[in-house]
Each structure stands twice: as C-alpha cells, then as structure tokens.
Amino acid sequence: MNEIMLNDMQTFSKYIPAFLFILLRMTIFINLFPIIGARQLPVQFRIGLAVFIALLLTPVVKFEIAENNIPMMVVREIFIGLALGLTVRFVFLGVNMAGTFISYIMGMSIATAFNPEIGQSTQISEAYGIMAMLFFLVMDIHHDLIFVIVKSFELLPAGQLNIKPMILQVLSLCNTLFVLGLKIAAPVMVGILVTYLLSGFLYKVAPQMNIFFVIMPLNIFLGFLLIILSIPVFEYVLNLEFSDMRKEMMRLIMMAKG
C-alpha cells in the first residue's frame, strides 16, 4: 500500500512544474482577455477558469524543465502571455480611443464614466466598447482565441520560446492601436470637420452671428447622426480586425518558436 501511494505521489509530483507554468501563461492571457477577463467579473471566476484549463492541459502538454533556468522560463512565460493577451486587448483599446476622438471633436469629452478596465472613459467610448463586445461574441471570436492559446502549448512548449523576434512585433501593436482608432472615428471626424469649415464661411458672411451657440448643438446632433450612419463601417473594420486577430496570434507563436 505504501509503495502504491509513493508511486502515485511521484507520478503526481512530475506534473506540478508543468501545471504551474501552464497556469502562469493562462492566468496572464485570461486577465487580458476581453469579457472573460473583465474586472467586473469576480477574481475567483478568472482564477478558476485558468486553473481548470491548466488542469486539462497538464497531462497532455510536453514539458521539460532545467533546474538552473527556472527564472528565465518564468520570464518567458510571462512575456508570451502578455504578447498574446495584448494582441486581443489592443483592438478594444483602439475602439475606446476612437470613441475618445469622437467625443473631443463633438465637444462631449466632459461626459465621462469610470471604466474598471482603463479608468475614466467617455460615454461614447463606452457605447463603442459595448458594440465591439457584442460583435466579438456574435462572431464567436472568443472560442477561436481560446483554441489558439491552447494550441500554443503544443506549438510552443512551456519555457521553450525565443523572446527577441517578438519584441518589435509587440511594440508594433501600438501602431495598430492608433490606426484602428482613426479608422473607426474617421467618418464622424470628417463630417464634423466639414461643419467647422462651413461655420467659418458663415462667420465671414454674418460676423454678428454667435457661431458658438449655433455650432455646438449642431455638432452634437450631427455627431450622433454620423455615429448611427457609420455603424456598418464600424462593423466592417472590426470584422477585419477580428479575422486577423487569430492570424496575428499564430504569427507571434511561430516567431517565438523560431
């Protein structure tokens, strides 16, 4: 009986290092994952989901550990979890930035709300964020991304990755953040910019008119109208971004593998 228990303990102890490293990568990724990793959800739920996935993967993931290289392996796992998580998170930050751009040009930047994910956020950013989450769920992207992170343990075993090729790729995500924000906000920004130009001509024709009291309510009305009319553009841009998200994550994994 003692020998059986000893063998069971030895078998179980072999899986502990693999479980801990898998749990590290999964925890970081899930905390950066939209909706599932939202701060509004209980911490117990996020940790429990990461532990559940790690328990499922531990028996099937190939894992080798070098006792003299544990700190570097931890750093690598943290980096790959951050890289894959930020690939997803930056798309939603770009949507939030688009709402901020629109709020400023409409003169509604003072209408803010507290967002647990990023702090203070404008009401228009919140509306865009909700629409982005709905598109994300309707397109079933969350299942695709969970599949990619699970697949990453097969393509990129824990602790066996090359950080250097990924650094520039992760930094380039900041460019996509600004580009996505401008793409989404462009229809509204261009429309309101035209009203500013026309108001300038109107001021030249009738300088006695108080342009400020005319242009402010007009910008708000026109801004909301353009937001509604540009929803198909918003959907098209997000469709492209969500479709490329899985490819981008797989490219990061292959770069780390190389």
Image (cartoon, rainbow, N blue to C red):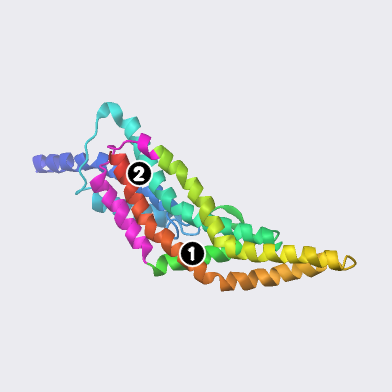
- Tell me if I can see residue 198 in this picture: yes
Judged left or right of residue 64, residue 106 is right
Judged left or right of residue 63, residue 221 is right
Mark sitting on residue 132: 1
- Which amino acid lies under the numbered mark 2 shown in the image of this protein? Leu
Q: Which corner quadrant holds the N terminus?
A: top left
Residue under the image location 59 percent in, 53 percent down: 119
Q: Which corner quadrant holds the C terminus?
A: top left
What crowding class fits label 1: few (fewer than 14 Cα within 10 Å), some (14-19), or many (20 or more)? Answer: many
- Tell me if I can see residue 122 in this picture: no
Was residue 161 drawn as part of the magenta stretch in this picture?
yes
Mark sitting on residue 24: 2
Q: Nearer the viewer, residue 238 or 158?
A: 238
Residue under the image location 21 percent in, 36 percent down: 64
- Majority secondary structure of magenta residues: helix
Extreme residue toward the top, this view: 68
Residue under the image location 53 percent in, 70 percent down: 231
What crowding class fits label 2: few (fewer than 14 Cα within 10 Å), some (14-19), or many (20 or more)? Answer: some
If you read the primary sequence from the N terminus, does the residue marked by circle 2 or circle 1 appear first? 2
Q: Nearer the viewer, residue 185 or 152?
A: 185
Question: Residue 102 at x, y = what percent?
Answer: 63, 61
Q: Nearer the viewer, residue 21 or 77?
A: 77
- Can you say whether 228 is above or below 25 in the image? below
- Which amino acid lies under the numbered mark 1 shown in the image of this protein? Ala
- Stretch in magenta: 140-166
Mark sitting on residue 87: none
Count of number-bearing discs: 2
Judged left or right of residue 224, residue 136 is left
- Can you say whether 218 is above or below 17 in the image? below
Question: Residue 14 at x, y = what percent?
Answer: 20, 39
Was residue 234 drawn as part of the magenta stretch in this picture?
no
Q: Gap between marks 2 and 1, in whole Å?
A: 28 Å
